[in-house]
Image (cartoon, grey):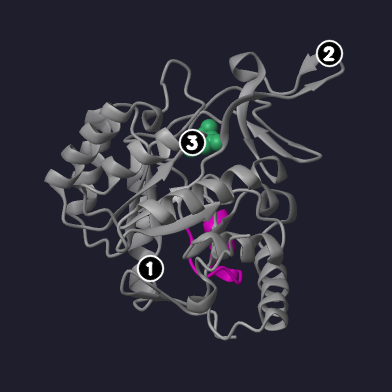
Amino acid sequence: MDLGVDFLGHSIKNPLMNASGCWCDNKDLLDDLLQSEAGTFVTKSATSEYREGNPKPRYIEVPLGSINSMGLPNLGIDFYLNYSLEFQNNHPDDINFLSIAGMCMEDNLSMVKKIEQSEFKGITELNLSCPNVPGKPQIGYDFEATERILEEVFSLTKKKIGVKLPPYFDFAHFDAVSEILNKFPLSYVNCINSLGNGLYIEDDTVSIRPKDGFGGIGGAYVKPTALANVRAFYLRLNQDIAIIGCGGVESGKDMYEHILCGAHLVQVGTQLMKEGPQVFARILQEFNELVKSKGYESLKDLRGALKSM
Ligand code: RRO
């Protein structure tokens, strides 16, 4: 099957990519993604300046996934914007995603302005859901703050903007958030970030150092929640807002299920960290075999085609 996707007018060779924060913090890791079979890539969420992040250990793999409290370690917006501009010059037919997660409104707006004034032709992902910066609640759980930041951002830019959302667990929240998002010329939503503030215990002890062990959960634990969020937003958002599915993607079957629920693109996080960038070739091969065996002829036929009982 041809796995090419038309994403907001850009052609992408296949729908699989990394999740922000995974294998994308620095030049070497980003270069690895370029060499891999991923269709595109997103950079680590950037702040205005370099950040060291939280004390280590701050990421561990556990049998059903991962727990992290990285605390936004990153090289600063200038690095990721310059990397993206260079990528764009070398690959004029391709696009990438540039993730930003300001420490406050001004921080976000100054990064949006910087991107607006640059030659960046890709898509900016506004991360509204980092669970790990001590003292900073996740914006996506504060609906007024979410609307306020989108108003400000869209008053500053005509470039393409998507948002990374936290997981929601209630139909009233799916409805309320969709109503806000539908007011804006948003390019896409990305469902989901890690499940915030879980706790993983081993030998009576927390397993990561920051925040008394509380951290974002990823991997197999989160797949049903991720699929539910993809589906809930697919059914509620305006047709011109695309969906990126993220959460629990370990196999071609997981990728298939995200697309079945409505995802245009699918991201790999925990499994990329476990397996390295060769994960993309494996998942794409498994996905190809599965869609063939199910008789689908195009990705368009599969997207959103989840059946009711
Ligand atoms: O850096 C992190 O701690 C982090 C971020 Br910005 C995010 O969006 N999600 C996550 O699980 N960790």
Q: Can residue 43 be spotted in the picture?
A: yes
Give the number of the disc on residue 168. 3
User: Depth-wise, is mark 1 or mark 3 nearer the camera?
Assistant: 3
Which of the pair 285/210 is nearer the observer?
Answer: 285
Q: Earlier in the sequence, mark 3 or mark 2?
A: 3
Q: Note whether 160 is above or below 2 in the view shown.
A: above
Inspect this view and state whether residue 73 appears: no
Check the image and name the residue furthest to the left.
Answer: 155
The answer to whether 80 is drawn above or below residue 127 in the figure is below
Instruction: Give the crowd class for mark 3: few <14, some 14-19, many >=20 residues within 10 Å.
Output: many
Residue corresponding to mark 1: 95
Residue type pointed to by label 1: Ile
Q: Position of residue 20 (x, y in %)?
A: 50, 48
Dot 1 falls on a residue whose secondary structure is loop
Q: Which residue is mark 2?
A: 204
- Residue located at (40% from left, 28% from top): 141
Q: Residue at x 51, y 28 (%)?
A: 71
The amino acid type found where label 3 is placed reads Tyr
For marks 1 and 3, give the CA distance.
29 Å
The numbered mark, 1 or 3, whose residue comes first in the sequence reads: 1
Amino acid on which the number 2 mark rests in the picture: Asp
Marks 1 and 2, the one that precedes in the sequence:
1
| Pick the front one: 182 or 166 | 182
Q: How many marks?
A: 3
- Dot in front, 3 or 2: 3
Residue lying at 73% horizontally and 50% vertically, measured from the top left: 274
Residue 64 is one of the magenta-drawn residues: no
- Residue 145, image x, y percentages: 27, 28
Task: Decide whether residue 30 is among the magenta residues.
Answer: yes
